[in-house]
Amino acid sequence: MTAPHPPVGPDSGPVDGVADVLIIGAGVVGAAIARTLAQYELSCVVVEAGNDVGTGTTKANTAILHTGFDAVPGTLESRLVRRGARLLADYAGQAGIPLERTGALLVAWTPEQLAALAPIEDKSRRNGYTAIRPVPVAELYGREPHLGPGALGALEIPDESIICPWTTPLAFATEAVRAGVTLRLGTRVTGVRAGGPAGGRFGRPEHEVVTDRAGTLRCRWLVNAAGLYSDQVDALAGGQGGFTITPRRGELIVYDKLARPLVGSILLPVPTDKTKGVLVAPTVYGNVLLGPTAQDVPDPADTATTADGLAGLLAAGQRLLPRLAGEEVTATYAGLRAATEHRDYQIRVDAARRYACVAGIRSTGLTASLGIAEHVTGLLAEAGLPLTERETAGPPRMPYIGQAGARPYQDAGRIAADPAYGELVCHCERVSRGEIRDALASTLPPADANGLRRRTRAMNGRCQGFYCAATVTSLLGAAHGDQPERPAS
Amino acid sequence: MTVPARGADPPIPPAPPAGGKIVTDVLIVGAGPAGLAAAIELRRLGAGRVLVADREPGAGGVPRHCAHTGYGLRDLHRVMTGPDYARHYARLARQAGAEVLTGTTVTGWDDPGHVTMTSAAGVRTVSARTLLLATGCRERPRSARLVPGTRPPGVMTTGELQQRVYLHGQGVAGRALVVGAEHVSYSAMVTLAHAGARVVALVTDEPRPQSYAAFRLGAAVRWRVPVWTSTAVTGLSGRDRLAAAELTDLRTGAVRTVACDSIVFTGDWIPDHELARLAGLDMDPGSRGPAVDTALTTSAPGVYAAGNLVHPAETADVAALSGRHAARQIAAMLGRGRPDSGAGHQALPVPVPVQVEAPLAWISPSVIRDPGTPPPRGRFVLRSTEFRPRARLAVSQDGRTLATARLSLRPARSLTLPAAWLPHVDRAGGPVRVHVKEWA
């Protein structure tokens, strides 16, 4: 389904045709900045090349809400991860974003790794995270009886959590759009004509942002949150550069929900000089995740899995959790982290140019998103963006797609009020017709089957569409006014 | 054996209440051929109230979307298309007085006395004296087969393909590859052709096709579709739509890329065993269905399993006969006046396992509790992972040979072993071994 995307949000757009702020990129970071700026008297436009929010690094990662215990102390990343984790945990509670505080166990398998535990504990304390503690081997196996043999020691990080990486950016974007932000999906920025020096209230003349689908958009302030493309956008915008994005691909395997009892906490590897290692984590959808690999790739769109990558993960899984090998694989995928040559985020605001660069948000962007948004908003204010608070509706209440809480199919009252919630369409994930209908009618409706997957979990289960894909495609096609002959998408 | 229920229909029990607890003699999960055949037989035998729950909007199971003919041979002694067969069974079940609840998902259970289900009518609990699991099987999707590459639209299983084409009128355009060369693969090929796609080839990692010669000839002559043997799909590419498949020749290691817009992964069946596993039933490691004895009893008292849940996948008629077999065992058990609640069933005797050795993959039933009860159709069902055209199978227990049988082994093809040796099994003995003794 490649229908053009009408802008979501107020049709009129900015009053004088010039937005106060234009954000390039609606990943979790761009969406977080948009919902934070939406708290103020500003006109704001978000331009996103993908056909949905969160289609880049945001959607395909390990979905962990980090404590930041292992960040590089003293970095901006360390500070914003810690701050962002608190803000997001709070926001998740209000918005109904699936979140489980499973805790993590960092497990050492070699004498070298065992020796690394004490320095990691020390680093955690320097990062301000003091709840970390050593766990004796007997206690480790008591808590994780299915762990493979040979663990020598572990650290417990009780506040590491798992979160839904799909609902999070959708909640941010929904809140932003409902508060008046215009979201232009499926719109790629092809050029920027930077405005002149600041002057007057906002400075003039304004920036002109050239796009492939929405013509030229004008704005006073420009925010680059383009993730894997942020170095390219920085060059277009005449930024100061100084960083290059090298996409680092991580492949992951998702195991069947029947494997979920095999693991209690997130099982983290001890990073060494040679390798970052592979983790095992529960997911908020009730599955078990194994990964990621780490491979630098030249193409910021190369999310293909590889035979070697998957084979390596299977071998690692065999050692970490031998019984995983007896369970079915539900999905495999690969995501790309926006790594740079630097050990920290690349965030800076150029007051003279009225330009913010928010780049190099490697693999902690989901956790840090609200911290980053708060930080960037502060920098923009310091640089002269006038911020006047206004009344907004606050976080939206998102449909709950986690496994730990009650889903509509379990809710007798809800089905009594609306029988569509009792009519299951996707059997593996127990997604009702009512939930699909709601997603199709939501503030940010899905553009295609993948968008529907991220909103409802439909077709994400063990059968991968054997039972439901045809029905779901028909529902999606009907919502998009397609002819029934249309092949799947 | 013929399907019963001529003449006066049995009285139809009152409709289940729209909430609260439903009490029944038998709850069958799954209204496919096995579940419906069991329901009909149970009603014929006067087993009381029989409830069939199915999560799909229509009764009949997988045959609902198999437009080809060949259904009904062994169970109904006639031949019809899949949808006709599904309708026929659904009608017979209703006429027999079974209550078939479609659009009803069994979401959890502890024992037959405590089953939870969801439908548009609400969240309800069922208390059954006995439970029959007939949840069938599905094909392993691309992800479970660990085929690397991108994840574009256009990648599907036969089940999805058939529903798209026959239930939803969706077309499939362009070039298509079919992965597999067993019966279902040929069905996928015909469905694709019907939907407007051009089938480039059937691709199998086996050295030869596993289906009937007639199907192979049909593919070659009528549809002009080649079968590429000893060939594995080792990658997929394309972003907004599938663009190509990477194929590796397993004999030479040569890799080539074949352009295609769709790819259908066929066969490689896995039982839909979620409910069986949620309640902790003993599972058979080979078939991955619940381990059942020759009466199709699982490891939990009062819980039976039949059809392709225990032998993934046999044809619909074999599944139906399996369901009918389970029904007779259930009816006999209920007739003996066993206690009402699931928890109150008598403890089951310790079973004798039936174990297969490579290249045999699994056998069903896979445990023996009563050597006096023959399995459905008087046969065990097996699968092989390799071709052994003239194999001699030996059945033995504690070093004592119980039987030998000649069989032609082919991967993914149904194999059966007559159960005449069953009465000679020593209930107190060790496992029964089934292995390939020699082959030509």
Image (tube, grey):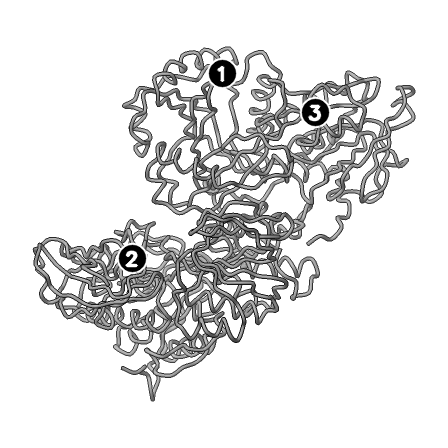
Query: Residue at point 71% right, 22% down?
Result: A376
Q: Secondary structure at mark 1?
A: loop
| Inter-mark Cα distance, 3 to 2 | 58 Å
**Which residue matches tag 3?**
A358
Q: Is residue B384 left or right of residue B422?
A: right
Q: Is residue A247 left or right of residue A404?
A: right
In depth, the one of A389 and B88 nearer the eye is B88
Coordinates of residue A414 in the picture (x, y in percent): 52, 52
| Inter-mark Cα distance, 2 to 1 | 49 Å
Q: Quadrant of the C terminus of chain B?
A: bottom left
Callout 2, which amino acid? Answer: Gly
**Which residue matches tag 1?**
A129
Q: Is residue A183 left or right of residue A75?
A: right
The answer to whether the residue labelled 3 contacts the one labelled 2, judged by CB atoms less than 8 Å apart, is: no
In depth, the one of B134 and A208 nearer the eye is A208
| Inter-mark Cα distance, 3 to 1 | 25 Å
- Callout 2 environment at 10 Å: few (<14), some (14 to 19), or many (20+)? many
Instruction: Say which mark, if any, is on residue A64.
Output: none
Marks 2/1 same chain: no
Coordinates of residue A411 in the picture (x, y in percent): 48, 50
Query: Residue at point 26% right, 71% down?
Result: B325
Callout 1, which amino acid? Answer: Tyr
Coordinates of residue B31 in the picture (x, y in percent): 40, 68
